[in-house]
Image (cartoon, grey):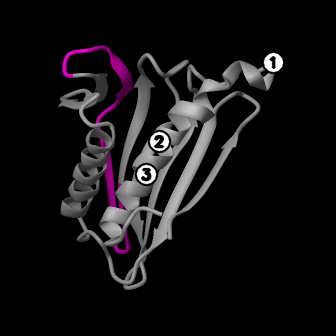
Amino acid sequence: MVQTRAWRLPDGSITTEQRVGLRAPAVPAGEAGALALHRAYWTEVEGLLHGLVRVHEHEAGVDIRLLAGGPALIRLGPRRVTVGRERVTCRYPILGGLLTRRPAGALTLEQVGGPAAELHSSVAGFHPRLGARPGLPPWTGILYPRVQARIHDAVGRRFLARLAGGAPS
């Protein structure tokens, strides 16, 4: 079962973490595992939104675009892969886009542990344009939890469930 935690910091940034336990590692150790995390996540982004958004990979990173040639909703820097004995991490810095208030934070996809591994998906330090701004009433950011946060949660659940071999919870 996928577990989710989310919170807002005083600076207006959002952090969400999702995790699921595994009976066995879902991806191989090393660069191949990081690439598998990368491919699986972006497949879920495009699949969940039925082509409304497209993932555009390029030398400078990844853009999540509205339709094929539309504006970048979120721009991410190049993936940074970290591989250890019992850890495979694929991390993308958040650079901007229409749905971001400012460049900050990161998307991280990760598998940790040996035989009893866990998969993690997190967005940390993200400043959503649709979120409440510091110093303003919380209702000013009502669209973020009702739209963007729900989409992110659904993508993360599908990503983790697919790699864990089950249905999204």
Quick one: SS at disc 1?
Answer: loop
Residue sitting nearer the eye, 42 or 92: 42
Label 1, residues with CA under 10 Å away: few <14, some 14-19, many ≥20 = few
Kind of residue at disc 2: His
Q: Mark 2 vs mark 1: give the one in front.
A: 2
Give the residue type at disc 3: Gly
Picture residue at 26% right of the left edge, 44% below the top: 47
Residue 134 appears in the rendering: yes
Marks 2 and 1, Cα distance to the nearest angstrom? Answer: 25 Å
Q: Is residue 51 above or below residue 132?
A: below
Q: Residue at x 33, y 19 (%)?
A: 72
Disc on the earlier residue, 2 or 1: 1
Q: Which mark is residue 135?
A: 1
- Residue 29, above or below 74: below
The boundaries of the magenta stretch are: 68-89
Q: Quadrant of residue 116?
A: bottom left
Q: Which mark is residue 152?
A: 2
Q: Looking at the image, is 43 positioned above or below residue 67? A: below
Image marks 2 and 3: residues in contact by CB distance under 8 Å: yes
Residue placed under numbered mark 3 in the picture: 156
Residue 23, given in percent of the width and then of the height, sits at 38, 84
The numbered mark, 1 or 3, whose residue comes first in the sequence reads 1
